[in-house]
Amino acid sequence: MTDPGERLRSSLADQASPPGTDFDSPIAMEALRATRVLHAADQDPFPLPGRIRVITVANQKGGVGKTTSTVNLAVALALYGLRTLVIDLDPQGNASTALGVEHTVGTPSVYDALVGDATLGEVVHPTTASPHLLCVPATIDLAGAEIELVSVVAREHRLRRAIEAYLVSLPTERRPHYVLIDCPPSLGLLTLNALVAGDEVLIPIQCEYYALEGLGQLLNNIDLVRQHLNPGIAVRTILLTMYDGRTKLADQVADEVRNHFGDLVLRAVIPRNVRVSEAPGYGQSVLTYDPGSRGSTSYVEAARELAERGAHLRPLPAERPGSSPAAPPVAALAFGGAAPDPFPTEEQR
Ligand SMILES: Nc1ncnc2c1ncn2[C@@H]1O[C@H](COP(=O)(O)OP(=O)(O)OP(=O)(O)O)[C@@H](O)[C@H]1O
Ligand SMILES: [Mg+2]
């Protein structure tokens, strides 16, 4: 049962409802959906992943919903009880904006960890969306990183090593269950770092005519990274975004993507929804901006599927080429259960 409305109806059927209550009215349904999202963790927590999941959200095509998906999936995972870290790897800093995290020039950011000597722990920021959600912001400084990194030793491994060192530095009960990396719309050194850092790739595909254009190039690059830099990387998830049910084209694209990628494609599809596009303007995810909206509930459904699939993953063996000798690979690290503790904030460290 994937339709959020259906889910609500069936859960409501279990509860005695006052006579005359019309749960089918649009406003009542929306209010109920909102309550569901906001009180999510108490009612219906997502399952823990079988291992720490580092997910690279990539598609070199611009404007396909990478940032929107990173942010909203991350907020959903966090609201449903999973510790989540967003790493903004795009100099545009859109994920930082959407999470309400400061990213003006001079703010400690991912740039300091990639190009400088900072640890991720020194540049991680809390978010207002959830105590379970942290963000490493990107400032415009990152725009220079593509060039500055060229002369840096092990330049493709910088992010991976930063993540590994960060996770190892945390006690198990504070390690994130999910790390989501938002990539820029290019296949340069930043995206390469994200592909080397990740254990899996999530590709958002916009349900539009040119959706599949350029995808072959992305898949080729992922293959190259697997052969030479990160043997563990694989495309594990495809998410259809900005689906407009009024157009035949959206269905055609969705069918084509499903035929091609099969089970990699999440059943949940993100509709084109104005609340989704409004939310970043308020420094918010759609889940916190308008929790009862269709955009919000579909991101919750997508995150639930992602989490359910993750529950079946097994920890990887500790030996893994490409990892720094000082730190075990991320996917071999243990984490504590879904502890109520928030992540360590800057003051706590
Ligand atoms: N489901 C949706 N409904 C309506 N608007 C959406 C939806 N998803 C994304 N958008 C809007 O589409 C635009 C592009 O989305 P987003 O920034 O997430 O894409 P992106 O792939 O990260 O872009 P870039 O390649 O520039 O980083 C944004 O203005 C966003 O608000
Ligand atoms: Mg983006």
Image: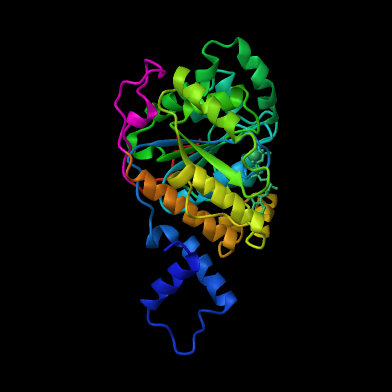
In this picture, is 259 found above or below 181? below
Q: Is residue 71 inside the magenta stretch?
A: no
| Residue 262 percent location from the top left of the image | 46, 46
Q: Quadrant of the N terminus?
A: bottom left
Q: Is residue 326 inside the magenta stretch?
A: yes
Q: Is residue 203 left or right of residue 236?
A: right
In this picture, is 15 found above or below 153? below
| Residue 269 percent location from the top left of the image | 54, 55
Q: Is residue 103 left or right of residue 218?
A: right
Residues in magenta, as a range: 314-337
Identify the residue at horizontal 56%, vertical 56% (top origin).
287
Q: Nearer the viewer, residue 58 or 277?
A: 58
**Total numbered circles:** 0
In this picture, is 270 found above or below 112? below
Considering the whole magenta stretch, tell me its main secondary structure. loop
Residue 106 image-quadrant placement = top right
Residue 275 image-quadrant placement = bottom right
Q: Point out the quarter of the image occupied by ligand 2.
A: top right
Q: Is residue 111 left or right of residue 263?
A: right
Q: Quadrant of the C terminus?
A: top left
Spot the residue most to the bottom: 19
| Residue 278 percent location from the top left of the image | 69, 55
| Residue 8 percent location from the top left of the image | 45, 70
Identify the residue at horizontal 61%, vertical 10% (top origin).
151
Identify the residue at horizontal 36%, vertical 76% (top origin).
14
Q: Nearer the viewer, residue 154 or 35?
A: 154
The structure's colour scheme is rainbow
Answer yes or no: is residue 231 visible. yes
In this picture, is 66 found above or below 303? above
Identify the residue at horizontal 68%, vertical 53% (top origin).
277
Answer yes or no: is residue 241 visible. no
